[in-house]
Amino acid sequence: MSTEARRVEVYPGKEVVVDFDTDLTFECVEECTWCCQHGVLLYEKDLLELAARESLAESTTQFRGQDFVRREEKDRAEHVAEDGGACFFLREDGLCALHDEHDWKPARCSVFPLHVTVEEATDGEDPELHVSIREEAEEHCEGLNVSERRVVDHLDAFLPELLWELDDPETYREL
């Protein structure tokens, strides 16, 4: 197992520092939906994309000046958090309406189970994006280490290019 931090080019000229075991694998598994039980942070580009597909008035809320897909109480026992809530777009069958019906999902959903932070470079260069595994994911996410799909080999699927455009792409912000 290789746990030493290393730089990985995700897109041409866009690197991240990987702070997780490079042998880690991830694949969404049916019936899990743990990541869908939290409010989803929407970056400005996500908000515009969502507005082209769904009603923002129905599906979003603001919290501390940031836009989120709202959580709502679901009238069921499956695919919900302990408080009975889940993402507005999580259907009863455990699928995401945005992903299933529009073949799109917000950047924050793509990033899961990763955690993105920004750290100032020590040599005065541009800040660096660091990618680790969300601590809670290690405890709750059923998709870790269940497949052959190594996360480090597929970082472009997890990390949308827009993360490099943001002043603060920190992904650990919840509703």
Image: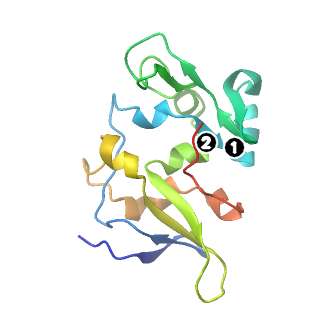
Q: Residue furthest top?
A: 75
Q: Amino acid at mark 2?
A: Pro
Local packing at callout 1 (Cα closer than 10 Å; few below 14, some 14-19, many 20+) is some
Q: Residue at x 39, y 46 (%)?
A: 136
What quarter of the picture does the N terminus occupy?
A: bottom left
Q: Is residue 24 in sight in this rendering?
A: yes
How many badges with numbers are in the image?
2
Q: Residue furthest bottom?
A: 123
Depicted 33 relative to depicted 148: above or below: above
Q: Residue at x 45, y 26 (%)?
A: 95
Asked if disc 1 and disc 2 are in contact, CB closer than 8 Å, the reply is yes
Using the image as rendered, state which of residue 58 and residue 102 is in the foreground.
Answer: 58
Q: Is residue 143 in sight in this rendering?
A: no
Residue 48 x/y as whole percent: 76, 40
What quarter of the picture does the C terminus occupy?
A: top right
Q: Residue at x 35, y 32 (%)?
A: 32
- Pointer 1: what residue? 46
Q: Earlier in the sequence, mark 1 or mark 2?
A: 1
Local packing at callout 2 (Cα closer than 10 Å; few below 14, some 14-19, many 20+) is many
Q: Amino acid at mark 1?
A: Asp
Residue 31 x/y as whole percent: 33, 28
Using the image as rendered, state which of residue 65 and residue 55 is in the foreground.
Answer: 65
Secondary element at image label 2: loop
Residue 83 x/y as whole percent: 46, 22
Residue 65 x/y as whole percent: 76, 42
- Pointer 2: what residue? 106
Residue 170: quarter of image: bottom right
Secondary element at image label 1: helix
From the viewer's perspective, tell me whether residue 48 is left or right of residue 29. Answer: right
Using the image as rendered, state which of residue 38 and residue 157 is in the foreground.
Answer: 38
